[in-house]
Image: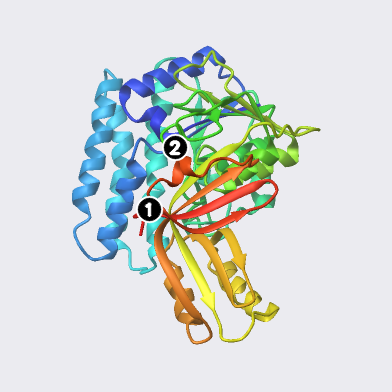
Amino acid sequence: MKIYKFGGSSIKNSKRVKNLSKVIKSVGYKNTVIVISAIGKTTNKLEKVVNTYFLKKYPYIFLFEIEKNHLKMIKNLFLNKNYYVLNILFYFNNIYFFLKKNNILNYNFIYDQIVGAGELISTKIVSDYLNYKNIKNIWIDCRNFIKTDNCFREAHVNWKQTKKKIKKLNNKFSYLTQGFIGADKNYYTTTLGREGSDYTASIFSYCLNAKSQTTWKDVPGILNADPKVFKKTTFLKSLSFEEAFELSYYGASIIHINTLHPLKKKKITLYVRSFFLPKKKGTLIKKKKQINFKNSFFILKKKTILLSFFIKKNFVEKNLSEIFNFFSKKKIKILLIQYSSISFTVCLEDKFNKIMNIILNLKNKFIIKKINNVELYTIIHYKKYNEKNFVKNKKILLRQINLDTAQWVLNQNGT
């Protein structure tokens, strides 16, 4: 089987949904699993619903807006819209019911039950439209197949159960399902982390021993740098899994890092292609015997935090292990590490606002300095690139260069 994954931008309006149907028809849809994200910025809007609900404010204003946008899309896609409207209202009614009846005051749990609905709603619309256009597919609820623990917002896949469920799919049919979501043993919705739809696709690829996986984007493939940030960019026809890992780890948004592990393990080829240019081959990611390091990769990670720890005596292994232990427990991703005999500094991202908890636990043992909203520039396959090209009026807070990778932490305010 083949696995296709389409992100939210590919279905952000009715015009894009119609384009998606043409892409699928042109590349072939038999014996496929199609993974679809939530429509456009729906996830962000549902997050507002969660935040206002948790703060005991009025979340329904945002929910009404989301419902209105989806109903408008249905009106633009189907001639006889009443049947399809009822299908969608079922999911919105479930959200309203949850908001009214829920008594569990756990933010992450509430988040997954509400935000996870975005994918269910979008896939029902897209699946119905494809069948409406005679592109036959079977809609399936991903929660029946991807089984996880109850670590809400960053759930871990139970691979044994998940593989057993997914292998029951008949490879003679085409299926359409959701990205991003799964379910725990109590059938509560769980999510795999933001941008987790790519990961969902690779889970299906792994369990079905897929021939290939294609991620459809609004770009022609992968570039060696973000064209919005860097003036000169190079289109990459192919990448090794190792290079793709590095790009993802340091903040390139084109591929979710968890996507790559299952694919590499099964040696499944990953394509990154444009849904605007479906005839173009895009970028190929695969296992390579020899890795070509001729391209430098330029990555900017914004809104990171620079955190420094100081003690009166010299650092010892016990000090470092204590700090790392807190980072590990809180699942905080470290992007850069630098230490000396008197200090230890990290640049990191704090997706779930857990840094303050670490500071409170360690402030009695360390003097801690925290700088918010710094920029981290990373150059992989560093070739004495002129840092003036991106530093400009910004102050360099930290610089670290080794044989292959260079990193700069900059204060974007220049002070």
Q: Amino acid at mark 1?
A: Gln
Say which of 33 and 292 sits in front: 292
Q: CA distance from mark 1 to mark 2?
A: 32 Å
Residue 299: % across, % down? 52, 42
Give the mark nearer the N terminus: 1 vs 2.
2
Answer above or below: position of 10 versus 409: above
Question: Quadrant where the N terminus lies?
Answer: top right
Is 316 displayed left or right of 73 in the figure? Answer: right
Look at mark 2 in the image and give the residue it sits on: 37
Asked where in the image residue 83 lies, by quadrant, the reply is: top left
Answer above or below: position of 28 versus 44: above
- Residue drawn 64% across and 82% down? 314
Asked where in the image residue 119 lies, by quadrant, the reply is: top left
Residue 207: % across, % down? 68, 39
Is 71 displayed left or right of 157 in the figure? Answer: left
Disc 1 is placed on an element classified as loop
Look at mark 1 in the image and give the residue it sits on: 412
Is 107 displayed left or right of 137 in the figure? Answer: left
Question: Quadrant where the C terminus lies?
Answer: bottom left
* Residue 337: numbered disc: none
Q: Is residue 167 visible?
A: no
Asked where in the image residue 202 lies, by quadrant, the reply is: top right
Answer above or below: position of 271 versus 102: above
Q: Amino acid at mark 2?
A: Ser
- Residue drawn 25% across and 59% down? 52
- Residue drawn 24% across and 47% down? 63
